[in-house]
Image (cartoon, helix red, strand yellow):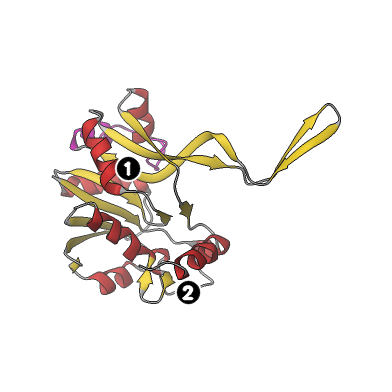
Amino acid sequence: MVIGAIFAGGYGKRLQSLDPKLPKVLLPLKDNFVIMDKQLSDFESAGLDEVYLMTGYRGEEIEKRYGNGWNGLKIHYLREGEPKGTLWAIRNLFSKTDSDVLLRNGDTICDLDLKRFLNFSLSNGKLSSIVVVRMKSPFGLVSINGHSVTKFDENPYLPYYINGGTYFLRRGIRPYLNRNYRDKGVEGSIFRSLAAKGEMAAFKYGGFWKPVDTIKDYEEIKKIYLERNI
């Protein structure tokens, strides 16, 4: 059995000026359709029927919106009283379930086919899988030949990959959870250990992908969704 889980406990400090009463995942993409609706819709489309929401800041607003279920998905809540980091959240999640987990960052929007990623993860034999996306330069690049400028590339994609914010974790990762890590984040702790043991597969994704980190990010994504039929 595979369950879904979403990191939804962030403060979203850079977005607080939009609506300080709402957690980031409840910011609307269009009328009556918020970021968390998008995440849950993706899980539903992938055939999952149970999701854990790992909440924190203004978590009561998330519970108020979704209750115990949404569009056929059974929803559970794991709420942090204070920020403890994603490592603690994962440990807490696996203390509540004995299932494999399809996990997402709540503030990353993309058109990834979760069913395809899930099939990839179940078939590759590794303990974990991660979606990776090409890194986009935050700056324009200048090509030169000697002292001559030959070309400008505005924010090109670089030959590197970054974390795409979607993961598959088998229940067999438990021995990695019990280790003593200095880092409170999953990338610097569990994920680093799994990668060192060759137990993490990479799923390369090249479609629409954008984290909601700043007001500019949010406004760009809203503009895209205003033109979409949901």
- Above or below for 3 versus 65: above
Q: Are marks 2 and 1 in contact (CB under 8 Å)?
A: no
Residue assigned mark 2: 19
Percent x, y of residue 179: 29, 32
Residue 175 forms part of the magenta stretch: yes
Image quadrant where residue 146 sits:
top right
The kind of residue tagged 2 is: Asp
Tell me the mark number nearer the camera, choosing from 2 and 1.
Answer: 1
Image quadrant where residue 201 sits:
top left
Label 1: how many residues lie within 10 Å, few (<14), some (14-19) or many (20+)? many
**The N terminus is located in which quarter?**
top left
Percent x, y of residue 76: 20, 60
Q: Point out the stretch of residues depicted in magenta.
A: 171-189
Percent x, y of residue 15: 51, 65
Q: Nearer the viewer, residue 171 or 125?
A: 125
Q: Secondary structure at mark 2?
A: loop
Q: Is residue 116 left or right of residue 137?
A: left
Principal SS element in the magenta part?
loop
Name which of mark 2 and mark 1 comes first in the sequence.
Answer: 2
Q: Nearer the viewer, residue 52 or 157?
A: 157
Residue assigned mark 1: 167
Q: Secondary structure at mark 1?
A: strand
Residue at image coords 25%, 42%: 118
